[in-house]
Image (spheres, helix red, strand yellow):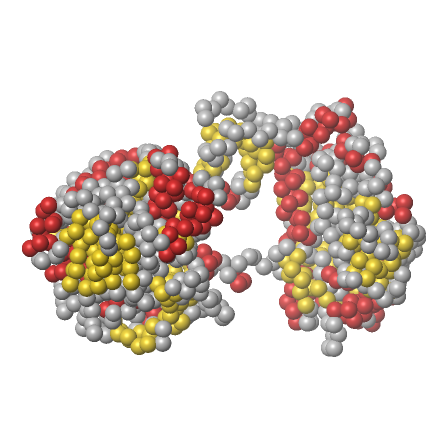
Amino acid sequence: MTFRTPTGGAIDRDTLLHFTFNGQSYTGHPGDTLASALLAHGVHEVGGSVKLGRPRGIVAAGSEDPTSLVQIEAPFSEPMLLATTVELYDGLVARGLAGQGKLAAEPDPARYDAKHEHCDVLVVGAGPAGLVAALTAARSGARVVLVDEQNQAGGALLGVDEYVDERPSAEWVADVVAELKSTPGVLVLERTTAFGMYQDGFVLALEKRTDHLGFAAPEGVARQRVWRIRTRQTVLATGAHERPVVFADNDRPGIMLASSARTFLHRYGVLPGSRAVVFTTNDSAYCAAIDLAESGVDIALIVDARHEAPARLATECAARGIEVRAGHVVVGTEGAGRVTGVRIGPLAPASPDITVACDTVLVSGGWNPVVSLFSQARGKLRYDAELGAFVPGEELSTVRVAGSATGELDLNACARQGRDVGSEAAAAAGFAPGGQVPLPVSDSRCTARSGLVLWRVPGDDDASFVDLQRDSTVADVLRATGAGLRSLEHIKRYTTIGTAHDQGKTSGMIAAGIVAEALGVELEDQRPTTFRPPYTSVSFAALAGRDRGELHDPVRVTAIHPWHVAHGALFEDVGQWKRPWYYPKPGEDLHTAVLRECRATRESVGMMDGSTLGKIDVQGRDAGKFLDMLYTNMMSTLKVGKIRYGVMCGVDGMVIDDGTVIRVGDERYLITTTTGNAAKILDWMEEWLQTEWPHLDVHCTSVTEHWATIPLVGPRSRDVLAAVAPSLDVSNEAFEFMTWHDTVVAGVPARVCRISFSGELAYEINVTAWHGIAVWEALMAAGEQYGITPYGTETMHVLRAEKGYPIIGQETDATVTPQDLGMSWAVSKKKPDFIGKRSFARAENNRTDRKQLVGLLPVDPSVLLPEGSQIVETDRLPEPPVRMLGHVTSSYPSAALGRTFALALVRSGHERIGETLFVPVEDALVPVTVTESVLYDKEGARRDG
Amino acid sequence: MQLIPCPWCGPREEAEFHYGGQAHVAYPEDPSALTDEEWAQYVFFRENPSGPFAERWSHNAGCRRWFNAVRDTRTHDLLAVYRVGEPMPEVIA
């Protein structure tokens, strides 16, 4: 049996679309939604409810629908969509959901993007009020953006058969849209939902560009687009949602909102059923009943909760043979799946209930203005007792509301509001009034005002559903108020009402009303729950846009990167940098490769790509003075040609970075920072220069990427350097430790620094990034006879840890001082002040039980301690709380030591050297001996080769 | 996304800015002359008013300049922006 009307509706009846739902094949037409196509086949039951597994149908015709959740299976799996907002396309495969969908396991092949838009007046909603507002603003010359979530403009007019200006309303709508689209500076966006409203006129909107095309969606066109709109003025013409009345067993399929049934009839040419009972508290449902009756639906009864039915409408009903029973309500329903009957009783129970058979119940409990965006814009809401709903309660300077979003439900009045606020918004944005827009005149028979505010009909509280999606009932609300909850925000979280995909569009107001009744308070005194973005569901894919995969975050690579790739390096992410981690030979794992790299470097020569090291060029008359304040040690006394290691602290005296400072000239230094700290340290320097010492003549520039930096390390490094830098005297006397020389290496200008992060004889060769690869390859060639070995960050970490050199951020967090690291030698006693100095004198900094950097040698030399392990004092764990002495910061197997070792921060560590402590590893307590942090070449004999 | 009026660049989106805490907390002239408590006040203690608050901001992803702003902490409204070194302007919250 078909429920499609013979004519009518904005569908293309000549084209047949095939689709599959819950395994069954169906047909529909272009213009249908999945919901309207299902209803045309008499299918109401879409899925089940999330907790109770009760059947669920289709309640509304749009995005406010609480129940019709589906999962699209083809063309691409997508969960948690509403059958009422999925536009039908050929080949669609979908199934109903019970409150939860399933994300696709494979990546979404579609493209998503974002676009910025600036305008003078943004109008949200293309119903009568929004259209008039947009046209009024556009005629004044303002740049206007009009967004609307439907696939065509018209708003509420799409769901009625009313005439506007004595012609079908669609013609009036088409004329307005045509003028808007032909006006320069006006942008009309269909299928676009403004879902978030933020400060300073910032609005996010989601445009569904190709969803409705299904398999025919063109490749290369973004499926969805997030519009990032910045507007001076906003007009919210977001309309109103009809709300139901709660009664026992109100969740059966076949029970739907009266206006939605009317929309299915007029927009899609679909009848909701064969025999309907209408239950209303206001006039608007009469129009639905009359329209449906005229289309062939048997209207069994109109149950009007008001004591008197509206005379004129009752007469019209009588003329069509529709019985109206005033002062009555629906007290319950019957049916195994779909509704098969309703029980009717008087509002004040006196006479026994009667049962009326039907397959459809159409409910109207009044209208809720859509105030979500207004509330998001921090507009205060006010309770309108006549309407039984929260409405915008104040005027905002940049946000205006028009149409039924204000609570006004008469079309002519809505259009007038649209013209007024459209003109005000344009004026506020600086535009003089343009040609006046004539107001449309409607022949509408129904006004929705003068209703009775009725939240629920007393009955079985456990079967009276407030939020159909969350399976939350009147009983749940009463449990919440019974437990002492009074705030709507708390009750919302306790009952979960309003937390599903629909965010309580049809249930929130009713929940507030039931709470107020239960507490015996006035809704005027209740604060409504805060509306938050997004207004409708937005997928993470859309929010991510193009910022996925490689575009998620910039990837930084060094000039020498292609060589590392070609030679099989594995990479480690350090901040945004890709750094070679180690270079495995065939059959090697991390462990064996690193042992080989370490051994080669300590016994002969190795080299690595150190280009990621942060480098800051510091220039100016006061550069030395400035660096004296930044570093704990003295930099102004450094001679040109020399290099000094330095530590930086915060004002709290805690280490924030370390690195080398080389003096390039009288008024010029080059400092290096930890790879991951380069931007932070430049910011730190700028902060002090701009906010505290603007009188200092100092300028800082990042030069990290200008240089390729190659540490050449090991006893044979001098030989290799000599081979590629024939003009450089590389002898220990001519080229001392912690000095630098400008020279020529492999035929290109280079700055060579003699510094070491391994304890070995080492040179750091700096050339412009352009020559990086050439110099790297020249060094490889020159070192070949010594078995020169490229090594990565893991070997670098082992070599430096064997020497007890800390890595900032690994050995340190924000609680470690230079003294804790055993670096008192790097803290100047001569300087009157530097950042952090005063904190070193604080009592806290002088406690003897501070955590200090030490080495740990597991008693069993083959045991590798996991980094991050805790350290305790006893070989048995006492009852909790157990006193923790510190933790392991670095831990490696060492080729040079022939055993494992670790660095650790330990309470009173410097005093504990020689003690045995214990490290809980899984179920065992591993004994370790505390040592000095320097474990290899304590005398520093290897430094000069 | 709030707009923050950088005194050098004009209004820009807040994502371009970095927050720097309370303004007009000068680095002490001579830290060594301070008691532990006075020094701790400088290092650790800041105001936390409900209402207008003079703060430091940096236009980090723009001109990279630091400036000061008076922000109403109840509404996030920026009541005034001014350059480093200038006194806090009178504002009406």
Q: Classify residue A74 by image quadrant.
A: bottom left
Would residue A571 appear left or right of A228 to someone viewing this image? right
Would residue A121 appear left or right of A275 to someone viewing this image? right
* Residue projecting furthest to the left: A319
Residue displayed at 60% across by 27% down: B24
**Foreground: A523 or A752?**
A523
**Foreground: A39 or A49?**
A49
Kindly tell me whether residue A45 is visible in this rendering: yes
* Residue projecting furthest to the front: A351
Q: Position of residue A127 (x, y in %)?
A: 23, 50
The quadrant in which the N terminus of chain A is found is bottom left
Residue displayed at 81% across by 62% down: A924
Q: State how many labels appear.
A: 0
Would residue A567 appear left or right of B18 to someone viewing this image? right
Residue displayed at 50% across by 70% down: A105
Kindly tell me whether residue A943 is visible in this rendering: no
Q: Position of residue A529 (x, y in %)?
A: 41, 42
**Foreground: A559 or A286?**
A286
Would residue B19 appear left or right of A325 to someone viewing this image? right
Residue A7 vs A553, above or below: the answer is below
Q: Classify residue A30 by image quadrant.
A: bottom left
Residue A25 vs A709, above or below: the answer is below
Q: Position of residue A932 (x, y in %)?
A: 89, 51
Q: Position of residue A914 (x, y in %)?
A: 93, 52
Residue displayed at 6% across by 55% down: A319
